[in-house]
Amino acid sequence: MAIFVDENTKVIYQGLTGRQGSYYGGLNAEYGTQVVAGTHPKKAGTDVNGVPIYASVAEAVEATGATASCIFIPAPGVKDAVMEAAEGGIKFIVAITEGVPAHDEAWFFNKLKRDHPDVQLLGPNCPGIISPGKCNIGITAGHIAKPGGPVGIVSRSGTLTYQALYELQQKDIGVTTCVGIGGDPVPGTSFIDCLAAFEADPETKAIMMIGEIGGSAEEEAAEFIKNNVSKPVSSYVAGVTAPPGKKMGHAGAIVSGGKGTADAKMEALRDAGVKVGLNPTEAGELMAEIVAGL
């Protein structure tokens, strides 16, 4: 099975009437994703390429039965868009938008945990999620993802999410679900959320985890793997050559006081029994070895 989404998932696009929303919403629909509605308070009653536009998420949910949403709203509006989705009945929210203020992320992350604990948020600043052959929500190119399992992928880096999919496709290895959690300081979905879901998924037999410098998410994931994950894991941590104190790429990737370095993360993962590659290709080769032994 897929985690979080599958072929039956109905998706509302908040921002479908915008340039990015209409483009990626169209690509996702072409892939086979059930893109059932868009929302815009001033464009209700219109459509985008045949997809109806509703004034609000609640109206769209009532009309379509959608359970997921994808947010392409500009950064200042993401806070309200996330809450509109949760209060409108959506259970899985994918926020693609980058540049969302960290205090907004912290606010709606905690608001969801407190008032809507049954809602799963992915992002912001993430490429989204793809269960190959079933559902693609976000900006991942569907043609680089081979369906059929047995590998689940979780990645902080957007670009390396795509490379992980491509590396496995080149080795004729299928993927159950690939989750790009994003690299912002307050991600809605963590490594541990995905590791737990993959551990529970009977079709996922092995896990590929892509991390990067900054924060402690990879060390926390390593501890979780050691204590809770029975399936084999391969990993790569980006930023081996990054100098301490420099922010590399985005807000979550900063090393300070000797903490958050790639070396420290790799050591923690190795200690948890993870096979760690020194580059994405090597991580893919390690996964190929794992899959050959399944």
Image: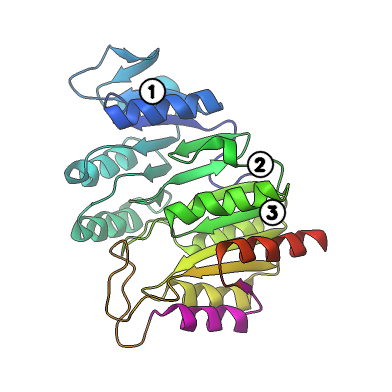
Residue 105 as seen in the image, left or right of residue 131: left
- Up-down relation of residue 110 to residue 84 (above or below): below
* Residue lying at 27% horizontally and 44% vertically, measured from the top left: 83
In contact (CB < 8 Å): disc 2 and disc 3: no
Residue 135 as seen in the image, left or right of residue 107: right
Q: Which residue is mark 3?
A: 204
- Badge 3: residue crowd in 10 Å (few <14, some 14–19, many ≥20): many
- Badge 1: residue crowd in 10 Å (few <14, some 14–19, many ≥20): many
Location of the N terminus (image quadrant): top right
In three-dimensional space, the C-alpha distance between marks 2 and 3, rounded to whole angstroms, equals 14 Å
| Stretch of the chain drawn in magenta | 260-276
* Front: mark 1 or 2: 2
* Element marked by disc 1: strand
Q: Does residue 54 show up magenta in the picture?
A: no
Residue type, mark 3 in image: Thr
* Element marked by disc 2: loop
* Element marked by disc 3: loop
Q: For the image shown, how many numbered marks are present on the structure? A: 3
Q: Position of residue 259 (x, y in %)?
A: 37, 84
In three-dimensional space, the C-alpha distance between marks 1 and 2, rounded to whole angstroms, equals 27 Å
Q: Which residue is mark 2?
A: 146
Q: Which residue is mark 1?
A: 37
In contact (CB < 8 Å): disc 1 and disc 3: no
